[in-house]
Image: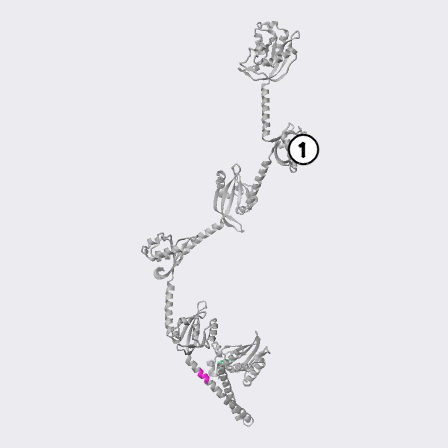
Amino acid sequence: MTKSLQFVSGGGEMGALIRAYNWESSPVGPADKWPQSLRTTLNILLNSKFPMFLYWGTNLVCFYNDAYRFSLGNDGKHPLLLGMKGEEAFPETWHIVKPPIDQVLADGEATWSEDQYVPIYREGTLKDAYWTFSFSPVKDESNKTAGVFLTLIETTEKFNNLKKIEESNDQLSFAIEATELGTFDFNPLTNKFIGNNRLKDWFGLPHEIEVDLTLAINVMVEKDRSRVTDAIQKTLQFESGGLYDIEFGIITPVTKQERIVRAKGKVWFGDDKTAYRFTGTLQDITEQAIARKKIEESEQRFRNLILQAPVPINTFQGPFFIVDTINKTALEIWGKTYQEVINKPVFDSSPELEDSIKKILHNVYTTGEPFIANEIPVQVKRTGKPDTAYFNTVYQPLRDLDNKIYGIIAIGTEVTEAVNARKQIEASEKRFSNILEQSLMAVSIFKGREMRISFMNEPMIVMFGKGRDVIGKPLIEVLPEIEGQPFPQLLDDVYTTGVPHYGYEMPGTLVRNGKAEETYFNFVYQPYREVDNSITGIVVIGTEVGVQVIAKKQIEESENRFRTFADSIQNLAWIANAEGFIYWYNQRWYDYTGTTLEEMEGSGWQKVHHPDKVKKVTEFLSEAWKKDEAFELTCQLRGYDGKYRWFLTRAYPVKDANENIERWIGTNTDIHEQKEKEQKKDEFISIASHEMKTPLTTAKGYLDLLLLLFSEENQTAFSYANKAKQAVDRLNSFVTELLDASKIQNGKLDYNISMFEFNEMVDEAIEDIQLTAKNHSVQKTANNTRQIKGDRDRLQQVMINLLGNAVKYSPNGEKVIIKVEEQDGNIQVSVQDFGVGMSSQHLDKVFDRYYRVQEHAVYFQGLGIGLYISKNIIERHQGKIWAESELEKGSTFYFTLPL
Ligand code: ADP
């Protein structure tokens, strides 16, 4: 080291290089000749940690320190640069550097340049670099500017960062532009904010730099204002975390349209936890909000639809199957309340469903494959008591707009009725085949045209006689002998036409009590129809009718016997149905009348009845058929020779098990001879009584005279005369009765109708009877004092007859009770005695002509015509007469007369 360079001791690498440099041949000359100003400057330069550079002298020779050397990098100009002329050192940038140097040299004033682009040669190439530098003059001893001192810092990195920031700022604003965001930067201390123009446009705010928050708040939709203010206040609290996210409406002042915006922001807090800045963005989400509202509405509609659906529906949300909608019907089925299940994972609220649907839900949720579960039995309590209902349920995935599954909808369709119906059908089919199996009827079912035996119950198998293994085989295979016979054709006809075929009373075998029995069957070959009515086979039903066939045969036989018998008797016989339609006559009838069944059927009999009487007979019969009693009538029937003969017709009703008349059987007995004799007898009686009447009256008159003569003088003669008189009186009354009877017989009994006091007439009759009946007391009660219309004498005759009988048939002298009562528009008279009475079979007959109870005839005198006449008189007055009696107790005779 030359002594002259002591002044540059230290100075690091550059200090060492300067000291070692051979300055003699350089433009600045040898170091010991350097002026003080250069030495001082170099000293400062080498000892500074700040990058420094010095151009010295007219050649602007280069000096620099370690700090500067650093920016030259490796493989650059270091260390060649030291001692070079400036012009030669930086030929590539000299045009940039030279002007400020020149200016400093000329003016002696320092310069300042910031972030100047001055490329630098380092790492083997010329690199972009930025610098902030100052050129300042260095004066020599004569106060002349001898060098230019350059202080500089490389700002390449800072510059690059700034550029990056700028770029990113550009990008941010581009993004803000592109996303159409409004931005704000709010100062909580001043309550003012800075916003971008878009935001200000939205709010219709002035384009000033700072705007008061209240102006913005006022633009908001009224209902949102306090909510937004509260949210801002809350966000400004440190505890809130300082994040802000809110939606609200604004009414843009210019357009007066409502927009919905979403504001997002962040608050910056100082160390003291107070907010100092609140920045953020606003986004116009009107369209989204509308869309979202629409979606919400549609979702709501969907929910309502579910809630109101009459079928069970619910939705499960998310992988935990949270029940987020469920309707009443579904709740009923689940047996849960709304609160129990809503918004809860289904298996939390209803663990019992886990077994049945967990797998299903999982599968649908993960695969998206819908699942259909059919006829799931569910216990429901719809009527208060548990009931099994059946549902077909569809589990369908719910997908969002991106087609992602977010839940499941379960829709049930109740099929209880169908299931029950099917079960019933199954049960009834089962029952049906059980019934068929156990039926006494022989049943088999042939299926298809080949008549395959698909069913055969035990009785049919027995009848068939081929064993059980015929089932399943075609008929022709089991019975090859029927081939070509009419039977297969018959079955085929039933199959084709659907018209059943009946076979009656066909002989066959039956095993009864282990014994084979020959018997008869009725067969029905019926088409076997499916539910759709199509014919797929034939049902054969055989009913054993052996008993019926035998019974029928027996009936036929007995009928035959009856006919033979009926035809062989003397009587004319006939059979009528319950309504009196005569459908059968015996041969005797046809022989006598000379007619045929065709003429006689129904009321053909009218043709052979006497034309004078046929009307009366018809009337009588039409009444008689209605009663269910045997009846009799006498009639005249014309013989084949045209002559009429008298017959007594007797008819008996034949009744079924229910006491309903099934038919009438009648016989007509020829009474022509008796009738003729009777007529002759009547004629005789009539003539005789008529002839006797006059002599009797004469005899009676003389006896009266005799009684008057003998009354005082000759007691004996008087009593004889009196007895004769009594006998004549009795004879007289007999004759009168006989005459009356024959008059009735000939329809010649006269009546004198007048109004009279009924009671008075009765009293007279009693008086009359009491004259002779000394041992009887006749007692009368009457509740009637009416005048009635009728033949007084004839009605008195009836009274006397009934009273006379009462006295006569109570020989021990009892009392006789007479009641005259008015009831139901009638006068009813009863005459009761306590005498011998009679058994009930006589009660009707005593009113017949000449009828007398045999036992009575032995002890009591009479002709048996008093009641016959009485009945006639009462009936002529449109009244009724009847008797009640009990043997040994007495009788009561009643008659009524209409008022
Ligand atoms: P009769 O002249 O025989 O009395 P009626 O015609 O008066 O003839 O009576 C017919 C028959 O009725 C009698 O023969 C008798 O058998 C019976 N009869 C009539 N009234 C009575 C009576 N009050 N008590 C018992 N039997 C009577």
Instruction: Classify 832 as above or below 354.
Output: below
For the residue marked with disc 1, what is the amino acid? Leu
Residue placed most toward the observer, 704 or 601: 601
Count of number-bearing discs: 1
Residue 237 seen from this side: no
Quadrant in the rendering for residue 457 = bottom left
Task: Establish if 762 lies above or below 539.
Answer: below
Q: Main secondary structure of the magenta part?
A: helix
| Figure quadrant of residue 760 | bottom right
Q: Position of residue 180 (x, y in %)?
A: 60, 31
Q: Nearer the viewer, residue 317 or 259?
A: 259
Give the colour scheme of this rendering: one colour
Q: Position of residue 29 (x, y in %)?
A: 59, 5
Q: Looking at the image, is 573 positioned above or below residue 113?
A: below
Q: Residue furthest left?
A: 481
Instruction: Classify mark 1: residues with Cα within 10 Å, few (<14), some (14-19) or many (20+).
Output: some
Q: Position of residue 289 (x, y in %)?
A: 59, 37
The secondary element bearing badge 1 is classed as helix
Foreground residue among 821 and 671? 671
Q: Quadrant of the N terminus?
A: top right
Q: Is residue 139 above or below residue 171?
A: above
Residue positioned most to the bottom: 713
List x then y, in percent, for residue 89: 57, 11
Task: Please indicate, yes or no, whether residue 581 appears anywhere in the rendered image.
Answer: yes
Q: Is residue 325 left or right of residue 528?
A: right
- Read off the residue under disc 1: 215
| The quadrant where residue 39 appears | top right
Q: Which residues are magenta?
A: 679-683
User: Does the magenta segment cover residue 650?
Assistant: no
In the image, is 472 to the left or to the right of 284?
Answer: left
Quadrant into which the C terminus falls: bottom right
Foreground residue, 220 or 23?
Answer: 220
